[in-house]
Amino acid sequence: MNAEKKQVLVTGGAGFIGSNFVRYLLEKYPTYGVVVLDKLTYAGNLENLADVREKYEPQERYRFVHGDIADAEVVAEAMQDCQFVLNFAAESHVDRSIEEPGQFIQTDVYGTYILLEQARKLKEAGEQGEGSPFERFVQISTDEVYGHVATGSSKEGDPLETRSPYSASKAGGELMAHAYYVTYGLPVIITRGSNNYGPYQYPEKLIPLHITNALEDEPLPVYGDGQQVRDWMHVLDHCSGIDTVMHQGQLGEIYNVGGGGDEYVNLEIVHTILKLAGKPESLIKYVVDRPGHDRRYSLSTEKLQALGWQPQYNLKDGLKQTVEWYTNNREWWEPLKSGEFKEYYRRQYIDRK
């Protein structure tokens, strides 16, 4: 591999954000190759990468490895010859973390450790002239590690106030990554993203769940009073933010990647979806709030913007495009809303007490 070519490992690359990033990276950097490592749990879907496989596999720029980031042998095989590692792999839904926190610790903390340890070996091998220099390990985290933000916006140096097993497990992965930077000199950078939306998002999250339910004339479940506030970001803005950090960020630093203050109350999102889908507000169904539900998140992105990044989507236009995508791609999401999803949906919204 010559100097201008790079090999990138994207863990969790068959998931929502990961698959969008894989596509983004291959389109933007013609000399990059990508290895995707994914366990293909319920939220990992090879159909998310069907066009990537068709276009880039024949060029030998794309390779898929089926496996768990907590499996050291699989990780070693997938990471060989890579100069970059971007860890998107995670158990990522708060509701599921409340039900089964152990799975989140296993993937988000222990799995991150396994990746860091293999990256450390690659770095040391490169320093000894036994391979290409290892350049960067980017740990993808979440704004939820800050916890509830009553006023203002969270900055990278603010204390972590995790309030769910999910956010605690993500904070644990972050802390391990930072420890490898300090202890072993591993070139680590951490990003914390706000709530994402866009194509290929598994229909358990608020926006795709409500879009697909509306399209099926099913009730749209709203937790509590629906007044929770989130800082929404289109997935492609997230991808460009991670790309900026990957190539320009300072090692050992943390960067917030957010929607640039695109804050909306959840109930407002629901009303907008119904309007865009041409459905009645009578579909709204209020359900008992989940335990420890954070009221508001908000990110300051000044640090990332200083590197030249700016979000390109506003929620009004991005949400319209997203509703159109789900309307035109029913063959992608309809099969997902059966089996395991139906049982999960029943527990969360129908049997909820």
Image: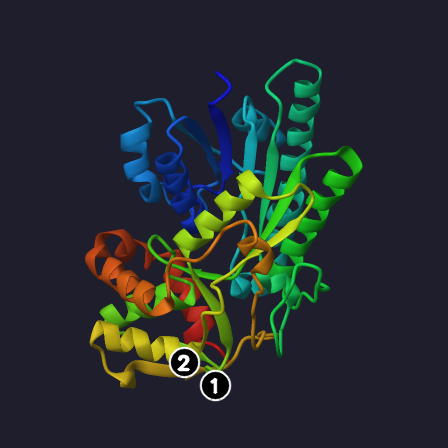
Numbered badge on residue 267: 2
Residue under numbered circle 1: 225
As measured in the structure, the alpha-carbon distance from the residue carrying label 2 to the one carrying label 1 is: 8 Å
Furthest-right residue in this view: 183
Residue depicted at x 48% and y 77%: 352
| x and y percentages locating residue 87 in the rendered image | 55, 42
Residue 76 locus on image (x, y percent): 59, 26
Q: Earlier in the sequence, mark 2 or mark 1?
A: 1
Q: Amino acid at mark 2?
A: Leu
Tell whether 280 sits left or right of 70: left
The residue that appears at 60% across and 60% down in the rendered structure is: 166
Tell me residue 322's x, y (percent).
30, 61
Q: Quadrant of residue 276?
A: bottom left
Which residue is painted at 36% across and 22% down in the image?
Answer: 60
Q: Amino acid at mark 1?
A: Asp
| Of marks 2 and 1, the one in the foreground | 2
Q: Please say if the residues under marks 2 and 1 sit with CB atoms less than 8 Å apart.
A: yes
The picture quadrant where one finds residue 296 is bottom right
Badge 2: few (under 14), some or many (20 or more) residues near its Cα, within 10 Å?
Answer: some
Residue at 66%, 40% in the rendered image:
188
